[in-house]
Amino acid sequence: MSLLERHDPFAKTRYVLREIARLKDEWAGVPMPLEGHPLVVEPTYPHAAELSQLGREAPEAPSPHLKTRSRFWSTHRRSEVLIWEDHSGPRKIEWGIVPGVHHFTQDLKTLGASVVWGLEQEARSIQLLATLLTHHAFKQYLLTGMFMDVSQRSGIHYVFRRLRPTIAVTTRNDNVRIIAALCLHPIAYYADSWAGAMCPTDDVIAHLMLMRGDEPLYWRRANQHPSWRPEAGL
Amino acid sequence: MENGETQEEVPAEIGLAILNVGEGDFKITFDRDKPGERERAARVVREMLQRGYAIVVAVGEGKYRRVKKFDPKTCEYIITDVPKQDTRLDAQTTPAVAVARSSAGCARGAW
């Protein structure tokens, strides 16, 4: 522990949370709150509301004079267009732009959140993943951060990626088409980032096992992003 | 070990691997001949299923299924296959991975 602490200032917090999880029979562990990185927690998780509020700024109170009429995604602007009614004076319809996700910003947030993961945890996950894949797929994952698997039920090809949504691809009639990008994290993830509460390979294993064990459940639990949205990570 | 005995290695695949924030994954194995271990394993699996964990087991070459129920008396996973019939798998020897309920990631729209 002292060796770890010399090099990893978060090791002790990780250890304490692990012990708390063991005492409370929280089999998946307790997500680590991190300053500047609010957690988005699965709602039925114990103390989800409290954990989600830690480090989160209080939302601005909505103006009583404004009412949202519509919002839609603009591919041209790579932003959301927001249209609202303003009743503060003579009734007006206004519109504005809400910029979409910028990958570099998200990458930096992921880098910041990575302090919650330990090398020990990631190493153990990689060992578990090795027992679930062929040598070829495992080698691809170690070298490229991704690998492909095919559902025996649906025939859909899935490209599993470290720290990115899984890409579901169909290959009917020799046409390759992306159906959706599937995003989910066991327990929680850090807002505005690709980082889950669990180490990256644990997220990959979660995607893989849900796909293999119960594909409909996998699709129900994941957020499904079209390939052209920045949230797809493409 | 003492007296030159060698410890039998437990294959890495055996047991229930639970994806865990603080441990990467932690593995539960048990000896059904030891009542304490058997009861603990049964309690853990039962509670996880109640809390919505997805427990996925290997049922054959490259085939996996989600566990629907668990029999604490026989320590067997019960899966329902197509056509609808229950298949029982020995929890002591069947490799399994447990995944907690998920927070669907990357909420759409402005962040």
Image (cartoon, coloured by chain):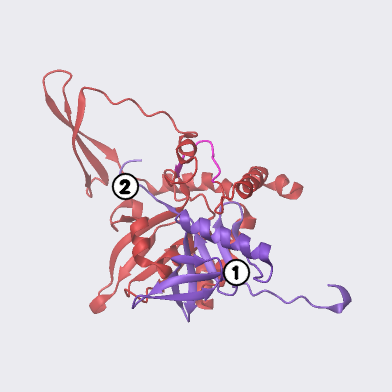
Q: Nearer the viewer, residue A47 or A82?
A: A47
User: Could you tell me which residue is drawn at 40 percent across and 58 percent down?
Assistant: A165
Q: What subunit carries mark 1?
A: B
User: Could you tell me which residue is drawn at 45 percent across and 38 percent down?
Assistant: A49
Colour chosen for chain B: purple
Q: Quadrant of residue B24?
A: bottom right
Give the amino acid at mark 2.
Arg
| B24 to A137, vertically: above or below | above
Q: Is residue B53 left or right of residue A69?
A: right
Q: Which chain is red?
A: A
| A48 to B42, vertically: above or below | above
Badge 1: few (under 14), some or many (20 or more) residues near its Cα, within 10 Å? many
Q: Quadrant of residue A172?
A: bottom left
Asked if badges 2 and 1 are on one and the same chain, I answer yes
Give the amino acid at mark 1.
Gly
Residue B108, numbered circle? 2
- Which residue is farthest top? A89
Which residue, given by chain and number where applicable, does mark 1 sit on?
B15
Which span is picked out in magenta? A31-40
Q: Position of residue A44 (x, y in %)?
A: 43, 46
Q: What subunit carries mark 2?
A: B
Mark 1 element type = loop
